[in-house]
Amino acid sequence: MTENDISFIIPVFNRPQEIKELLESFTKLSSEKDFEIVIIEDGSTDDCQGVIKDFNPQLTISYYKKSNTGPGDSRNYGMKKAKGNYFIILDSDCLLPEDYMQHVIYNLNNNYVDCFGGIDGSHESFSDYQKAVSFSMTSFLTTGGIRGGKYKKKLFQPRSFNMGISKEAFLKSNGFGNIHPGEDPDLSIRLNLLGFKTALYSDVLVFHKRRVSISSFFKQVYKFGLVRPILNHWHPKSFRLMYYFPTFALIFLIFSIIELIKGNQVPLYIILAYMLLIFISSSYVNRSFKIGLLSIITSAIQILGYGYGYLKSSTILIFNKKNIEKVFPEVFFSK
């Protein structure tokens, strides 16, 4: 496997500044840059065509515009157009470290799989809030340990912010479905059922910026929780007990408030101990007490938002397992 075999697939929606920063990180890679970059404009009103022109002499970029059909379908569109035999899918809000390609090529040549997932981390240039969100989304103390590379399992489910897939696997699986979020674990599970192997490449790192406000972060993780029971329904063997953790945490919080009203403070002390653990861990990792405090807030949003979405979706599916796209229109795109 060489760089000539690889095409990067990057869907984008109204994020020209992010594309500029991502392409700048491509120019700083210590590799030969013989790969192709495919950028798919998913119905943007603020496109990045002007930004891309500034990088054409340095990078091989293929640029396409299409109507808005969601990130999954846009990735499929890009992979159909791409020239490579192996595709690496990135989110537009990622940055690449200089040694990214060396790790990718080494892993593909020494531990080849038809679909891999890398990890994400926080860059020193990120804001304190972005670092707190990154901690919440990658720490083993939250449900984010899978994304951060702490959780290794036989049938790993790569995430599309930093994901590789062979052309053969794409063609046989028909790529991503129209659910979003959740299109990446759905694809990973279907690939496993088709006999393709998936793996975590724990040294293939991207810096994931996640430019989201507190309200949009809650909406994001709420949708993560909403889609997981749908995936469990589609793929029953993919269910893991750990998916219940955020919902259990939400129920325990309600229980703690009720007990506190009754005069029992013990459940509240358990929650405070958990919050202290997050504060200490994040403060140590980020070398900042401020980020440690912010991480308490972002971790609470992540766990409770996901837990609420999971509980709501699970309850609805008990009574209605048909017409899922009509029941949950907010997590499906029309092609």
Image (cartoon, grey):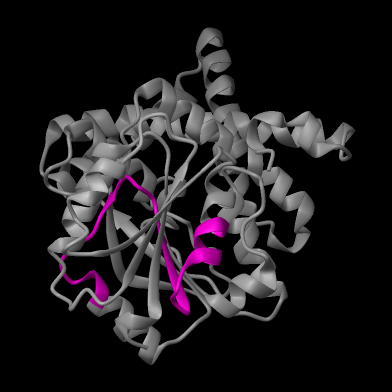
- Please identify the residue farthest to the top as the structure is shown: 261
Residue drawn at x 66%, y 47% as measured from the top left? 178
247 with respect to 146 (left or right): right
Q: Is residue 91 above or below residue 331?
A: below
Looking at the picture, tell me which residue is in the foreground, 196 or 165.
165
Q: Is residue 184 above or below residue 18?
A: below
Q: Is residue 119 above or below residue 106?
A: above
- Please identify the residue farthest to the bottom as the structure is shown: 110
* Residue 159 place in picture, x, y as percent: 48, 57
* Residue 170 place in picture, x, y as percent: 60, 70
Looking at the picture, tell me which residue is in the foreground, 88 or 214.
88
171 with respect to 205 (left or right): right
Q: Is residue 233 above or below residue 18?
A: below
3 with respect to 30 (left or right): right
Residue drawn at x 66%, y 53% as measured from the top left? 177
* Residue 35 place in picture, x, y as percent: 31, 74
Does residue 275 appear in the picture of this structure?
yes
Does residue 248 appear in the picture of this structure?
no
Number of numbered labels in the structure image: 0
Residue drawn at x 42%, y 29% as measured from the top left? 45
* Residue 216 place in picture, x, y as percent: 43, 25
Looking at the picture, tell me which residue is in the foreground, 86 or 125.
86
Rendering quarter of residue 36: bottom left
Quadrant of the image for the N terminus? Answer: bottom left
Residue drawn at x 59%, y 57% as measured from the top left? 185
Quadrant of the image for the C terminus? Answer: top right
Membership of 92 in magenta stretch: yes
Membership of 216 in magenta stretch: no
Q: What's drawn in magenta, residue-wise?
A: 76-101
